[in-house]
Amino acid sequence: MKAVSSYQLSERYSFKSIWRITFPILIALVMEELLGMTDTAFLGRVGEVELGASAIAGVYFTILYMLGFGFSIGVQIIIGRRNGEACESGKGFGAIGRVFWQGVWFLTALALVTTVLSYFFSPLLLKGLMKSERVYEAAVAYVNWRVPGLFFAFMTALFRAFYVGTRETASLTLNSLVMVGCNILLDWVLIFGHWGAPAMGIQGAALASTISEGISLVFFVIWTVSTVDKMYGLQKLVKPVWKELRQLFSTASWVMVEYVLNISVWLLFFLFIEHLGEEELAVANIVRSISEVPFVFSAAFASTAATLVSNIIGEGHPEGVPVIIRRVLVLCAVTMLPLLAFFALCPRLIIGLFTDIPSLVQASIPTLWVMCAATALTLPWNVYLQSVAGTGNTRVCLRFDVVALGIYAVYCTVVIGILKSSVAVCWTADGVYSLCIWVQGVLYLHGEKWMGKKI
């Protein structure tokens, strides 16, 4: 096994280099999270039913989206490995384009099938899961306008996978600014009925997000055609090749299932909370929206960790992985902990961005404090999970999630379903889940079974 030179660790994988890759990803994720946060902020001024319904419907849509996003992360891992191999040998960048195009064909088919199935089965599934008729009707209205945008969302995720996998992340910031700017404007117009448009309420929020993601995809296409080097082979149409699709799917499929399970945690949580009452559901949605801000910091650093781990293994230096993880975690802590402290010290200011209903503001404060504490205590979990994925051992990541989800489900059943605890106490379940992932990731990476994985 080759030794990692001091130059490689100090320059190519230095704190500065890690931050240079992470920052555009972070801004892109923050901007994208503003899609959901904008919906929550506007709908919080419409009513509790709409606010609560958008929580469940939003998580339900995210589960469908994670099918494609999870696949794109698998694509990103493979592109990162091919990029590392090509950088080491000085040739072979065209293999990245082939991986990208196979991803296009698979995700196009997946978007079509998912949209059709959702049209027929989503109302039935939501009906069986929800207690409040008013929340159910609003949730179905949201899903019917949101799901047709899956194709835009899947393709946008694929472009992001290409740029992150090749460590060229600068375009992500501009793309996200365009998308979020469009969404804020369209939310204002379609939810409340400005500029002569009908006041669509929760349906307007869904339509605004769908249109914004379509604009985001157009931006990525134009940017890629105009700026990306032809050595990657993106400009050359590659037909579907079953053998290549199967190889891609063997890695990406486990990530798909893992991401769906990961978001299912949220759906399970909100379904438990929905049975406590409409106000409790609204409180949970407000805090969930706030929690997405520190989460995107974690997700950005985790995505960087996955890419760098995949790249350095492709270069033939797996022994450098622990160093990368430590450096990513240091930067993650330095950026996230001050943010969580600010949220905890100024709860009314933060919660007031999402609702002007005094009772909701007051009821949300204890839950916000619990969220901040749980996030701070389990900060490294996502970095470890995605670092394992970056080694190519995506099946192991799925195992981590299955174990954590089982413990989480039992905990929610006892604390929420049986004890009927307050929303603040219920939120400790998030920390339990994260801790389970973190412990498994640490134990796995301290071994050496992952070093020989080929993808």
Image: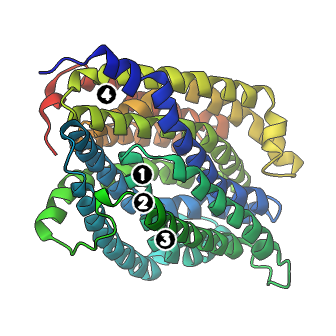
Task: Identify the element where label 3 is drawn.
Answer: helix
Question: How far apart are the two marked residues, 4 and 2, measured between alpha carbons?
Answer: 31 Å
User: Circle 2 is placed at which residue position?
Assistant: 159
Which residue appears at 35% of the width and 41% of the height? 406
Specify which label sits upstream in the sequence, 2 or 3. 3
Specify which label sits upstream in the sequence, 3 or 4. 3
Question: How far apart are the two marked residues, 2 and 3, measured between alpha carbons?
Answer: 11 Å
Q: Position of residue 297 (x, y in %)?
A: 56, 36
Mark 4 vs mark 2: in front? 2
User: Circle 1 is placed at which residue position?
Assistant: 163
Q: How busy is the neighbourhood of tag 3: few (under 14 within 10 Å), some, or many (20 plus)?
A: many
**Any part of residue 206 in sight:** yes
Mark 2 vs mark 3: in front? 2
Are dots 4 and 1 in contact, CB under 8 Å? no
Are dots 2 and 3 in contact, CB under 8 Å? no
Mark 4 vs mark 1: in front? 1
Question: How far apart are the two marked residues, 2 and 1, measured between alpha carbons?
Answer: 6 Å
Q: Position of residue 278 (x, y in %)?
A: 70, 57
User: Circle 3 is placed at which residue position?
Assistant: 152
Q: Amino acid at mark 3?
A: Phe
Disc number for residue 93: none
